[in-house]
Image (cartoon, coloured by chain):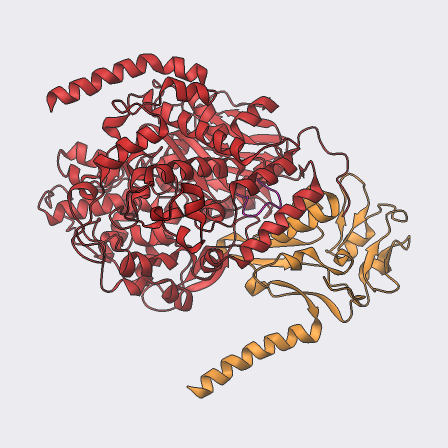
Chain colours: A orange, B red
Amino acid sequence: MIEVVIITSIKTLMVDPTRCTGCRTCEMACSLYHEGKCSPVLSRMRIIKYEALGKSYPSVCAQCSKPKCSSACPSGAIKPGETTGILTVDDSLCTGCRTCLVACSQIGFHPQKKVAFKCDLCGGEPQCARFCTSGAITFSGVDEFLMARRRAVANKALQAVQV
Amino acid sequence: MVDGLVNGLVNGWTGKRLRVDLSSGKTSVEEIDEEYRKKWLGGRGFNSELLYREVGPDVEPLGPDNRLIFGVGPLTGTFAPSSGRTTVTARSPLGGGFGDSNMGGHWGPELKFAGYDQLVVQGKAPKPVYLWIDDDRVEIRDAMPIWGRNVPEADAMIKDELGSEEIHIALIGPAGEHIVRYACIMNDVYRAAARSGMGAVMGSKNLKAVAVRGTNPVDIARPQEFYRISAEIRDRLRQDLMAQMLNDQGTWLLTMPANYEQGWFCWHNFQKGYHPDAKKLSGEAHRDNFLSHREGCFACSISCGRFSKIKEGKYKGEITGGPEYETLTAIGPRIGLLDMDKVVHNNKLVNELGLDSCSCGGAIAWAMECWQRGLLTAEETGGLVLDWGDQELITKLIEMIAKREGFGDLLAEGSYRAAEILGRGHDYSISVKGHDMSQDDPRGLGFAFGIGFATGRRGGDHLQGLPCLELTGPFYPGLVEKILGTKEAEDRLSPVKKPEMERYQEDLKAVGDSLTQCTFTHSWSFAVQPEDMALLLSAATGLEFTAEDLMRIGARIVHLERAYWNRLLVGRLEDRSPKRFVEEPMPDGPNKGTVFPESVLIPRYYEVRGWDKETGFPSAEILKDLGLEKIAAELEPYRADYRKKVEKASNTA
């Protein structure tokens, strides 16, 4: 357990769809962690599956720096946390108008509470990334993620040269 | 984490059974009460019980009264590791008796999210239809436009018609429509409920597909505890060598040890257990040259599933889900092929046509061996020359079988029936109770496996118990000794404690198939132990279960399935390995000279089980002890009839 304040612009969820096995463990972790129930519909993030092609795509909230969900919200219910920068929905302010759903595809709508919900990065230890064994979803710094990919390309290139 | 909102009265399960009568077009929802849930768990347990109760000895496998049952369990569609499996059950048109098949993918969890533990289909639709289950809305829809389409085409057409990609579909291909006796049911395009002809039963009902969309949650009684236990097991699986190897190479990893170390690589219909070039089909070769993607069934981090791409040669550019080890050997070495591109292509063919690869390979291998031995003429094959490994012939035969064309019509009956019809070649049908063997040879794989092959609930198949204690067990120091009291049982080809091992694994597998949790988590990888399953189940349902409770339920399910066969007057006389395993010593390879000691091990297995040595029926005491009093009483007249059958057989002998 890392006990540091997470600033989302430094560290966030990164997705590598080429590694996703489509198992949807992440959806179950998310739903059970946040809602105490197992349901893809209650998960903050979802896997888009292309069964005939064997491909899957993790669809997660990017914690944008200029968030459309937040600017679309007429009641000011979606705001970045003061210390963490994590965008969350304030249930007490949300009127259930669903404008945010139109503004961004990463917002969910709670079927019982009738309010919007979204990824809150589990307060700093995202469970989807914690249980993703394939490495498709990682919680990392943007530069770290990019450099890992660049390094993979570099490894291949060097191998090719050395042969 | 917050504790659940207001949880439902039923946790884990949904407590509901959906029944669809295709003859009348009526659908109904039935309650599954707590007593029943505690007695039969779910999935395979629910299905086997319903089959026993509703499909008696007079019901024809391909008649309207047979039931096609889809079952999921209390852990299906939850965070529990590898819990997305589904059992499909019916009286089998291949073996004629008990039939079931277990599939991965994401269809079962979707059925659970739609609100059901079980779907029972009965009757026969007057014309081709498909089912559309959208939460509590159930429709029987016209399937004429998709009838005749192969699996990926039909899957795409249904999604198009229903206007959504977020649907999971279980369906049959042309093989099921033509009632090939070993047609399979596919879901999510490339995941199969392959064995024992469940697709033929579906076809006989004029049912092309079952499309499901569910939006309800699975309620968990103690969410925090359930989360913690699941997380612990997930972390353990992540560190587990066997699970890591499955992820890395899939079940392809078996090729190298099966051939070079253990000598059970199925070559030319089990005529040999070794081939010097088997490495052409190694797990590494597949991973490095053919693997396009690893695939995970629902909530499974092991992700042993493969997605293959052929990068060069005649089949360049083809993509397909799979294959896994049984398929690659069935339509590979069993029929004389060692080229990976051909094997991957054939896998695509059988999947898209909706055939069980094992029985399909078994039927083709039977014909090829008959041809090799001069038992088939060109006149009988319609002019086909059945040489081993002739890829052009093989692809043609697969198509002919799926559509029952020409010689394919005979092979569509399965190797056992084909030999009966032809009146020749019985010894080359490598099957048990009419059900073709998977590509596993007890003369090398192991003797506990051999017991399962001879006595299996659906006939010859490795998934009776999947007794990996004798295969991967030795990788877990002290495990075999802890369970069986001696380290000696780790030796695959030692008879020591093998009946006990098989019993333990059969009971455990019945539990896993009922919860549902993939067998690879608790037998192959042994990261999940019965105690873990009990903890998961207790936290999910809020009812208390111990490991002992679960193993007892497992035994109950195994005995009920045994009674299903016994009621059809099948017992000891039919618990027979293919002759080849018992009479032909392994001709070469690491186990040269080995035979399976059936005459020693089967009677000992009966003894360990508490089954009657003369009939192979469970004793009335055992049945009563497992809470099957009614079945014990019902079985008595059948026991008497079977005794007469045994007497008659010994007189003839």
Viewer can see residue B182: yes
Viewer can see residue B464: no
- Name the one closer to the observer, B46 or B128: B46
User: Across the whole image, how many numbered discs are drawn on residues?
Assistant: 0
Instruction: Indicate the quadrant where residue B379 lies.
Output: top left
- Name the one closer to the observer, B540 or B388: B540
Does B79 lie within the magenta span?
yes
Does B591 lie within the magenta span?
no
- Name the one closer to the observer, B639 or B83: B639
Magenta span dominant secondary structure: loop
A69 to the left or right of B98: right
Q: Position of residue B607 (x, y in %)?
A: 32, 29
A35 to the left or right of B195: right
Decide: is B441 above or below B71.
Answer: below
B449 to the left or right of B368: right
Instruction: Indicate the quadrant where residue B422 lies.
Output: top left
Q: Where is residue B409 in the image (x, y as percent from the top left)?
A: 24, 38
The span picked out in magenta is: B76-84
Instruction: Indicate the quadrant where residue B404 lies.
Output: top left
- Name the one closer to the observer, B158 or B618: B618
Q: Where is residue B114 in the image (x, y as percent from the top left)?
A: 62, 36
Residue drawn at point x = 17 percent, y = 56 percent: B588
Decide: is B340 above or below B503.
Answer: below
Where the C terminus of chain B falls, by quadrant? top left
Q: Position of residue B100 (x, y in %)?
A: 40, 34
